[in-house]
């Protein structure tokens, strides 16, 4: 059963059988492309014709593939997503009642949460994040904070958290689900598990959110599995909610021309993970153990590991394939290290910040790939020894003060004012220092005294910002009163 790949098999068959494609897409198979790489993809880039099904109609090969996908993830129902994990997050927000209900969300959520809230009109109640003071990163949310907020906001209908975060660190989803449900079984727990699509396939990786008791989980499959960019899935446990709310919402938000190469790559990856996933992940785990240790032994570098987890409450496990490396013991910054890795070693890491770099390893990286990274790091760290200036305390943004729900704020009229005039006003734009790009201010939130001072700090530091019209923050967009 696991070796079956209904979508992939039918599009391959179609590509072999049909001599003339007198239908969309306009490239007519390989004829429309001059580039060889595109000609190869074009063969399987088909549309809805007899034999290829219709993604929006749960029958035939689509239904078979959907059922297989659900089985692989341990879900009652699954949906293919062809516009990334973002579209699953939008779907979940839009599947709520549409009556400005309250949803508890973490502040370190991906920006698709904000879009989801604008689309759906829900009102967020933000749960504070636990910060790793060593790395200056928002890492986790705690069940205790969630329960406190539920107690003072009895009208919250849904808890929508992120786990793992971008750095591969999970929250204690099982404890959160257990406590929320024990308090009120009608509250749904949704999880953005965009970076954890591989978790269900090996017990020594973090426990998946679905197995931990979540009602609906979004997996960004393209991030960690052999799936084309944008390929993701939405896994749901509550069948009634699925058929009444989630499926119609997903269909409404999903293109009528889904990419069959993306769908087929999900189909193939699911089959691979069910048949060989465990052994592939096992080998990757061994490599990870060996090289996390070796990198940690390099003078000047240290790898985020279990010891750091115990310093940040609310955390549970670490994805062994995310290698978060502190450079504090060297005389260079993470950005400089990443630049040298790229320029002199042809190695590109996922992200870099002043104090760290993040290498995202895949289960398909071979021993020589890990060795390449290790050797590069060792040589560079050896060339830049010594302690750089002592760790500075990075100010943490104050808690957000919501004045208008995201949807109301999004559709409000705005004006740009001089920075000095924005204190006490309502923000009309997103301001997110990056990396990692977590918003300190969202449209509809009050620029309190504390926030004004924090923005002033960002201006002085010339911190790169995502979101504002004027990235120097000389002028700030506010909502007209
Ligand atoms: C935690 C998290 N959630 C959701 C997303 C959105 O995923 P996608 O790019 O597949 O839409 C991202 C993207 O990086 C992410 O890091």
Image (spheres, rainbow, N blue to C red):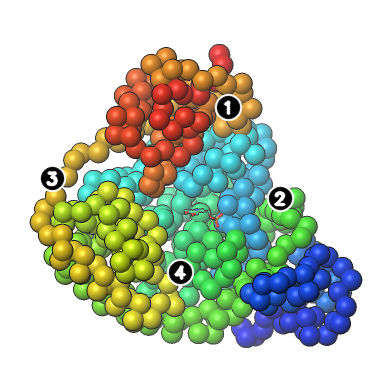
> To which quarter of the image does residue 339 belong?
bottom left
Q: Position of residue 373 (x, y in %)?
A: 30, 71
444 is higher (above) or lower (below) than 341: above
> To which quarter of the image does residue 108 belong?
top left
Question: Which label lies toward us, 4 or 2?
Answer: 2
Is mark 1 in CB contact (under 8 Å) with mark 2? Answer: no
Closest to the observer: 95 or 263?
263
Disc assigned to residue 253:
2
Distance from the alpha carbon under mark 1 to that under mark 2: 22 Å
Is mark 1 in CB contact (under 8 Å) with mark 4? Answer: no
Q: Residues within 10 Å of mark 1 (few under 14, many from 20)?
A: many
Please count the marks in the image: 4
> To which quarter of the image does residue 290 belong?
bottom left
454 is higher (above) or lower (below) than 109: above
Residue located beneath label 3 in the image:
390
Q: Earlier in the sequence, mark 1 or mark 2?
A: 2
Residue at x 33%, y 54% (from the top left corner): 352
Residue at x 24%, y 67% (from the top left corner): 377
Element at badge 2?
helix
Question: Which label lies toward us, 3 or 4?
Answer: 3
């Amino acid at each position: 059963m696991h070796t079956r790949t209904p979508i992939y098999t039918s599009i391959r068959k179609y590509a072999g059988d049909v001599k003339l494609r007198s239908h969309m897409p306009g490239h007519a198979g390989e004829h429309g492309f001059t580039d060889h790489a595109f000609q190869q993809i074009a063969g399987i880039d088909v549309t809805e014709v007899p034999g290829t099904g219709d993604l929006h109609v749960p029958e035939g090969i689509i239904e078979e593939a959907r059922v297989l996908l659900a089985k692989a993830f341990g879900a009652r129902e699954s949906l293919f997503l062809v516009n990334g994990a973002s579209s699953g997050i939008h779907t979940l927000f839009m599947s709520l009642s549409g009556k400005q209900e309250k949803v508890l969300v973490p502040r370190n959520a991906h920006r698709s949460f904000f879009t989801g809230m604008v689309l759906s009109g829900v009102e967020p109640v933000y749960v504070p994040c636990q910060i790793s003071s060593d790395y200056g990163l928002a890492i986790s949310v705690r069940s205790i904070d969630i329960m406190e907020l539920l107690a003072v906001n009895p009208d919250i209908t849904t808890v929508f958290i992120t786990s793992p975060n971008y750095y591969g660190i999970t929250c204690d989803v099982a404890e959160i689900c257990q406590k929320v449900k024990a308090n009120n079984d009608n509250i749904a727990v949704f999880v953005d598990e965009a970076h954890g699509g591989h978790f269900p396939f090996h017990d020594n990786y973090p426990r998946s959110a679905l197995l931990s008791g979540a009602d609906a989980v979004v997996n960004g499959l393209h991030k960690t599995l052999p799936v084309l960019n944008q390929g993701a899935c939405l896994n749901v446990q509550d069948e009634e909610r699925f058929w009444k709310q989630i499926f119609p919402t997903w269909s409404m938000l999903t293109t009528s021309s889904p990419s069959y190469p993306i769908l087929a790559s999900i189909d193939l990856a699911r089959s691979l993970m069910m048949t060989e996933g465990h052994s592939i992940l096992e080998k990757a785990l061994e490599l990870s153990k060996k090289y996390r240790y070796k990198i940690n032994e390099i003078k000047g570098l240290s790898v985020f590991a279990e010891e750091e987890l115990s310093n940040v409450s609310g955390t549970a496990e670490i994805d062994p394939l995310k290698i978060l490396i502190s450079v504090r013991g060297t005389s260079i910054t993470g950005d400089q290290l990443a630049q040298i890795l790229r320029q002199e070693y042809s190695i590109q890491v996922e992200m870099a910040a002043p104090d760290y770099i993040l290498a995202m390893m895949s289960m398909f990286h071979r021993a020589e790939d890990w060795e390449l990274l290790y050797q590069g790091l060792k040589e560079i760290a050896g060339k830049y020894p010594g302690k750089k200036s002592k760790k500075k305390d990075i100010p943490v943004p104050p808690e957000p003060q919501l004045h208008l729900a995201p949807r109301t704020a999004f559709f409000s009229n705005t004006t740009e004012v001089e920075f000095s005039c924005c204190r006490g006003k309502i923000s009309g734009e997103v301001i997110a220092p990056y990396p990692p790009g977590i918003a300190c201010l969202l449209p509809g939130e009050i620029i309190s005294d504390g926030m004004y001072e924090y923005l002033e700090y960002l201006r002085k530091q010339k911190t790169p910002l995502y979101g504002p019209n004027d990235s120097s923050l000389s002028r700030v967009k506010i909502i007209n009163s």
